[in-house]
Amino acid sequence: MAALRLDRITCRFTGRDGDGHVAVRDATVVVEEGEFVSLVGPTGCGKSTLLNVAAGLRAPTEGGVSVFGEPLRGRNAAAGYLFQGEALLPWRSAFDNVRFGLQLRGDPPEEAAAAARDWLRRVGLEGQGSKYPHELSGGMRKRVALAQTLAVGPRILLMDEPFSALDVQTRTLMENELLSLWQRDRKSVLFVTHDLEEAIALSDRVVVLGAGPGSRPVGEFRIDLPRPRDVAEIRLEPRFVELHRDIWATLKAEVMRAHAVDTVAP
Amino acid sequence: MSRPVLAVAQAGLLGGLFLLWHVLVRTEVLPAFFFGEPLVVLERVRDWFVSGSIWPHLGVTLLETVLAFVIGTVAGLIFGLWLGLSDGAARLLDPYIKGLNAMPRVILAPIFAVWFGLGVLSKVLLGVTLVFFIVFFSVFHGVREVSPAVLDNARMLGASRRQLLRHVYLPSATAWVFASLHSAVGMAFVGAVVGEYLGSARGVGYLILQAEGVFDINTVFAGVLVLTAFALLLDRLVTLAERRLLRWRPGGPGGRTG
């Protein structure tokens, strides 16, 4: 049984002038239990739209979502969502942010506090709990966000270019940490990125989304690289280079198409 | 400028203005009858505080101000959140709110005096009508600017509508409320003093009115001076509360003045 199944999803946005804009058309994406799947594609191809549909934050115009076999209605309670932008509550300290989800669902305060401390330690922020988000670096804020998302114990993890705002070194570090956290309990992951190298280094499977409007998956590639992986070193493996060449051949065509649409469109 | 230097410079500026005033009046460039004499003004202030005769009046004015400030702020916060989150109500009430805000509310003072008597209540209500709209508009517009990512994040972590209000909208609202509180303090004073001025038996506004009746310009200035000093004091209290409550804000809330 698939952890997450996006079944023939179509998303139509209504513009201000009443025009419909179809972001995604007839897209099917499946994440098996314990599988790490990345969605890559050119900018504006509706990757984030699909992720929001999977999260239950946006209802698809057509098509359906099922989570562990059950049709999804409203918010996807089995999923944690790591956002691209700054999504921490700025008026809460790191510690209070991490225990936020636990508070919301009414965990006993001592248990929530203990779990939050534990998660802060696991993301390497022991002793930084009293700091407010603006007092932390971008990488540290991402760690807090990761701990906040994982603390509530989601079975599915949705990530929308979570590391795109970080510098290259911090990014590699965070990718490795994500993998080692993931390695322990193998959650089902749907990871959106525009960075093909990141997608290959992290995933079991890479799904290439075509250029918008009305984009849909145009290719799927199984990443048969051994685990555990080190994202910095794995990029030098011959198999990695080979996979990169194969996927890029598909992705490149879509990027060119997206670019053409971009420059022709008024 | 460092803090102590700045304080000395600010005090020096005040002293300089008083000195200028003093010299202009003494050299009879300005007639003392219309412009008063700073030394007499300061003496009047000192007498008020030494004899304690100012306190009943000042107490009433401060009570009216603080009540107007607190009630207006809380009401503005509640209505701002309500209308900010409820599109239907906002559209229904839009012309009324704009109309009430555009109305010169000072003309309400005599009406309030008729309705609620010459006591504290009519002044408080006048102050509330002034404070309310300042806080209301800043919360109302602020609600629409809550980061969508923060909202989505809270939703994904399982926040119900009620929890969103309590954990996301309300904390964001405190920031917008504080942005407006500095002007609200001044407005609360305006409400109290104008209300007293137009009809009362007590308060600093009443003192000023009495003094004007006998062309005692020095007492008028003394009253204005006392009011200004206490307005600054209240503003200072707002700043202190702001520093405590908005510690989470980048750059620190102390840096901005409203």
Image (cartoon, helix red, strand yellow):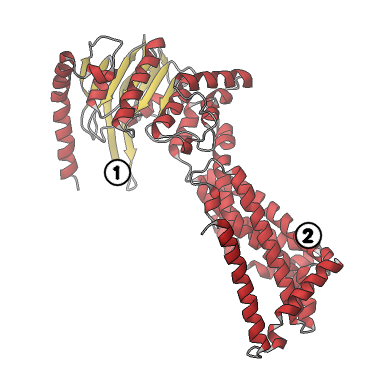
Q: Where is residue B167 shown, x and y percent of the image?
A: 57, 35
**What residue appears at the point 66 percent right and 61 percent down from the top-left corner?**
B232
Mark 1 crowdedness (10 Å alpha carbons): few <14, some 14-19, many ≥20: few
Q: Please determine whether, in this image, residue B111 is positioned above or below residue A143.
A: below
**Pointer 2: what residue?**
B121
Residue B194 position by quadrant: bottom right
Could you say which disc has been placed on residue A75 in the image? none
Labelled disc at residue A19? 1
Nearer to us in this view, A189 or A163: A163
Indicate the chain on which mark 2 is placed.
B
In the image, what residue occupies the spot 70% across and 70% down? B225
- Give SS at disc 2: helix
Q: Compared to B87, does B98 lie above or below?
A: below
Q: Quadrant of residue B183?
A: bottom right
Res. A206 visible in picture: no
**In the visual, does A256 lie left or right of A57?**
left
Determine the residue positioned at 32% across, 35% down.
Answer: A12
Residue A227 position in % (x across, y down): 29, 10
**Camera-side residue of B116 and A135:** A135
Q: Residue at x 86, y 68 (%)?
A: B51
Q: Is residue A154 visible?
A: yes
Callout 2 crowding tier (Cα within 10 Å): few <14, some 14–19, many ≥20: some
Q: Which three-letter amino acid code belongs to the residue tagged 2?
A: Leu
Q: Residue furthest bottom?
A: B28
| SS of the residue under disc 1 | loop
Provide residue A199's location: percent of width, then percent of height. 26, 22
Which x, y percent locates residue A252?
Answer: 15, 29
